[in-house]
Amino acid sequence: ATLARVFNLREGFTEQDDYLAARSYGATRNGALADGGIDRRELHESLRRYYAMSGWDRKTGRPTQDTLAELDIAWAREFLPERMA
């Protein structure tokens, strides 16, 4: 997952791309979300928690140097965009 994240960041994806389409936040015709869609704030906080649990920067989703080293993929740092460094 961390290498996939590095690849996506290298290709220009950011944390802004980790969100769902606008229609996902509204109610559906039936099923679990019939009474209301996904809560934007809850999804936002869940993403931040996921980033932290993955060893990524909680705000940007960028894998930390420590995580890359721990996974023995420190070489992948050279593929991270400098604008995020």
Image: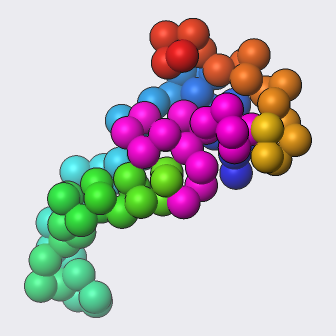
First to last magenta residue range: 53-68
Q: Is residue 41 left or right of residue 62?
A: left
Where's residue 61, x and y in %? Answer: 49, 40
Looking at the image, residue 19 lies above or below residue 25? above
Q: Which colour style is shown? A: rainbow
Q: Residue furthest left?
A: 35
User: Residue, x 23% and y 81% (percent of image)?
Assistant: 33
Q: Is residue 54 left or right of residue 26?
A: right
Q: Main secondary structure of the magenta part?
A: loop
User: Residue, x 49% and y 51% (percent of image)?
Assistant: 51
Q: Residue furthest bottom?
A: 31
Does the magenta run of residues contain 70?
no
Looking at the image, residue 68 lies above or below residue 31? above
Quarter of the picture containing the C terminus is top right
Q: How many marks?
A: 0
Is residue 4 at least partly visible in the picture?
no
Residue 39, by quadrant, is: bottom left
Q: Is residue 26 left or right of residue 51?
A: left
User: Residue, x 24% and y 65% (percent of image)?
Assistant: 42
Where's residue 44, x and y in %? Answer: 28, 54
Where's residue 56, x and y in %? Answer: 55, 44
Looking at the image, residue 36 lies above or below residue 69? below
Looking at the image, residue 79 lies above or below residue 38? above
Where's residue 34, x and y in %? Answer: 18, 84
